[in-house]
Amino acid sequence: MSGLGGTTPTEKFVHGLAGWLASIVMRRDASQGIVPNVVVGILGGFLGGWFLPMLGLGFGGGWVGFLITAFIGAAVLLLIINLITRGRAR
């Protein structure tokens, strides 16, 4: 994998999966479709890749590491969106 931006079809799939899983955990799956899940997964990958190393967390390379990083970042992103749009976390 070349990075957290999702340049290959495999990366897009992994980020889409991470965004979908995060939307289920954050209870936003009903309000999202496939494209928003992929976008949230890609943005979550960037977000997770940026702040997790600051916390001393690293999940290694490979698709599993990218999935975990993107999932955590996507969940944080959806939490922020929930706080902004609803005024509270779910």
Image: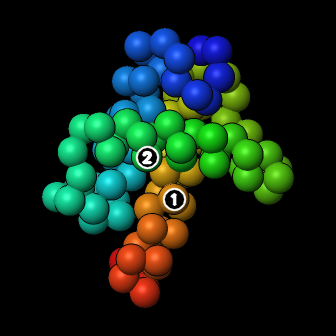
Q: Residue at x 48, y 21 (%)?
A: 11
Marks 1 and 2, how far apart in space? Answer: 7 Å
Q: Position of residue 12 (x, y in %)?
A: 42, 24
Amino acid at circle 1: Leu
Q: Which residue is mark 2?
A: 40
Q: Position of residue 22 (x, y in %)?
A: 39, 52
Q: Residue at x 73, y 46 (%)?
A: 50
Query: Which of the two discs, 1 and 2, labels the residue nearer the N terminus?
Result: 2
In this picture, residue 65 sits left or right of residue 81: right
Query: With respect to residue 90, does 44 lie above or below?
Result: above
| Residue 8 shows up from this direction | yes
| On-image quarter of the C terminus | bottom left
Q: Quadrant of residue 23?
A: bottom left
Amino acid at circle 2: Val
Tag 1–tag 2 contact (CB < 8 Å): yes
Circle 2: element type: helix
Query: With respect to residue 8, does 34 lie above or below?
Result: below
Q: Position of residue 78 (x, y in %)?
A: 44, 62
Q: Which residue is mark 1?
A: 77
In this picture, residue 3 sits left or right of residue 77: right
In this picture, residue 88 sits left or right of residue 77: left
Q: Residue at x 65, y 22 (%)?
A: 3
